[in-house]
Amino acid sequence: MPKTPRTVAPVGGIVAVSVPATPSRIRAHLQKRGNSSWADSGFRWLMLACALSIFAIVALIATELVTHSQLSLARFGLRFFVGRAWNPVQNDFGALPFIYGTLASSIVALVIAVPLAIGVAVFLTEMCPRALRGVLSFLTELLAAIPSVVYGLWAIFVLVPLLRNYVDPFLIRLLGWTGLFVLPDFGIGLFAAGVILAIMILPIISSLTREVMTAVPNSQREAVLALGATRWEMIRTGVLRNARIGIVGSVILGLGRALGETMAVTMVIGSSPTISKSLLAPAASMASVIANEFAEAADDTYRSALIEIGLALFIVTIVVNILARLLVWAVTRGAPPRTV
Amino acid sequence: MASRTNISKANRHWRWIANHLATGLAVLSTILVIAPLVAIFVYLLYKGASSLNWNFFTQLPAPVGEPGGGMVNAIIGSAVLLAVASLLGVPVGVAAGIYLSEFGRGGKLSNLVRFTADVLNGVPSIVMGIAVYSLIVLPEKSFSAFAGGVALGIMMVPTVTRTTEEMLLMVPNSIREAALGLGVPNWRSVLSITLRTASPGVITGCMLAFARVAGETAPLLFTAFGNPFSSVDLNRPIEALPLQIYLYAISPYDEWHRLAWAGALVLIVLIVVAVALVRFVTTRGVLKGAS
């Protein structure tokens, strides 16, 4: 670059040039308006306050739940979570049947949903023709838009008769020896709740699994294919193995949703505070007992016991969600954004 | 030597089978996932459409045993509840999104806010219902439409916050700089330049949150509670479409089951139309004039 002589700037580098201000409406307006710093900082604080309100909401939920479950916390202590009695008449409460119902229905849901969700994710990211991909992924996400109560309605009138007439007899013959599927069978019960939950958490698991699978760099796939692998071997060793932490994260996120799901489960679980080994027996989950009994709980201890179940549900879902978010975040961090 | 080629042949055979088996299983699971979706929609249309009529939109629920009746109270109630929820949830959510994208970008605090919003999104809706019950219903000693609206509004905040932030992040910096370079105050630049440019996306996010809470039942069970009569009073219990569907679905009467299907169809159509309308408007350029 040739050096051109340039005018020497005075020390400090700034030349003060006074240009006579052309009078204009804008300039006059700006002078009249003056400084906007107070408005700017006010705006900033307002936005900050709204952002902080998210913490406030979580704190508020926590304090409300803790204060209003004091009665039950003080009276039953930790015994509440191992007690099997649920007797509003004698004011004796234990949450074990509901904890069992929640866990069992969620596990059934995961057992059904996880293989299917991974299958869908594998199909959509690795095998599907491009033209079909958009439509299919839209359809699976549409499953997430259906309200819980509509799932429940469908489950009562379509899924439960289907299970009772066709699926359950088959399972009883096949797996009756395990004791998990034995008569009597009413159709409604833990298994029906698990199946409807599986349908509901599928979109969450499959869309997040898709996200972490897309985050696996293409060079991994190409490297495995170049070694002569078939497509399935490529998916198994190149994609699934690399994405496994993220997949575990998305499964845990689905679990979090299943644990707290209320309406659909309430409508098909049978609402019976009992623990039985058979998955075909009616049961109750933590969310379903709150939904069913809260409005009728006139007694303070009764209401407080139900709120304590809510508090337990709150804490468990928060822990599960934090865990899942951290896992998914660890995998997708720095990954390219997903293309449909 | 011969045995070795045999092994490798068997091996190749097995790998071929495994590959096609895996492909088949993936296709099968996709079909199994799509099947319930199709089944639900077909059933909704089949059962719902046959029991939808004009009375459904204009009449109050009929007493048990009498045929006919509608859900006009639930439709009005849902509109009131959703209006209250949007008035509370959307401004707070959008403002929080603005903070995350425009002021706290990359900071520790905004990471924490974002994380908390995601976690709040996973809190079961029934827990929200209990919290709002003990916050508003217990002190006031009455179920109210306002309490229901608050519960739904709180549920809207995290979704609106996250989508607003994502949409604002996509606005190119040059636009912000241009506004500031013209001497526009920062607050004005954020509101009428950045937010306005991103408005189609922000509105879509708000509609998605809206569609999500429109179908929520659990937080309304002991806040809005339900009401067999038309009401727009915020201090009194109010009916909502999902509540009515729930009540009718678990009842033993065929007539009520019929109405539940009709209600579910109306609810789904409302949700799908809301989302589709936003898509249509934002892609047709009516709102693009803003950018």
Image (cartoon, rainbow, N blue to C red):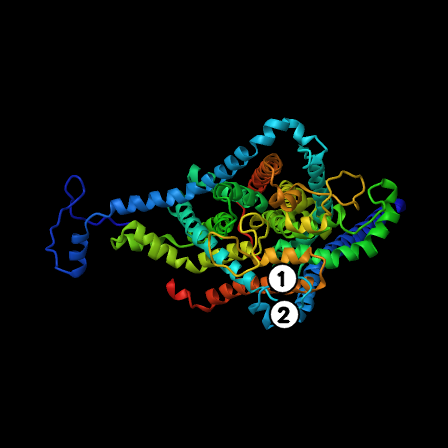
Looking at the picture, tell me which residue is in the foreground, A184 or A176: A184
Q: Regarding mark 1 in the picture, which secondary structure is present there?
A: helix
In space, the residues marked 2 and 1 are separated at their CA atoms by: 11 Å
- Amino acid beneath label 2: Leu
The disc, 2 or 1, on the residue closer to the chain's N-terminal end is 2
From where the camera sits, is residue A65 visible?
yes
Is residue B187 or residue A188 the one in the foreground? A188
- Chain at tag 2: B
What residue is drawn where x is 85% and y is 52%? A169
**Rendered image: mark on residue B264:** 1
Do the residues marked 2 and 1 share a common chain? yes
Crowd tier of the residue under label 2, counting other residues whose Cα lies within 10 Å: few below 14, some 14–19, many 20 or above: some
Foreground residue, A210 or A180?
A180
Q: Which mark is residue A30?
A: none
Which residue: 64% across, 28% down?
A76
**Residue located beneath label 2 in the image:** B52
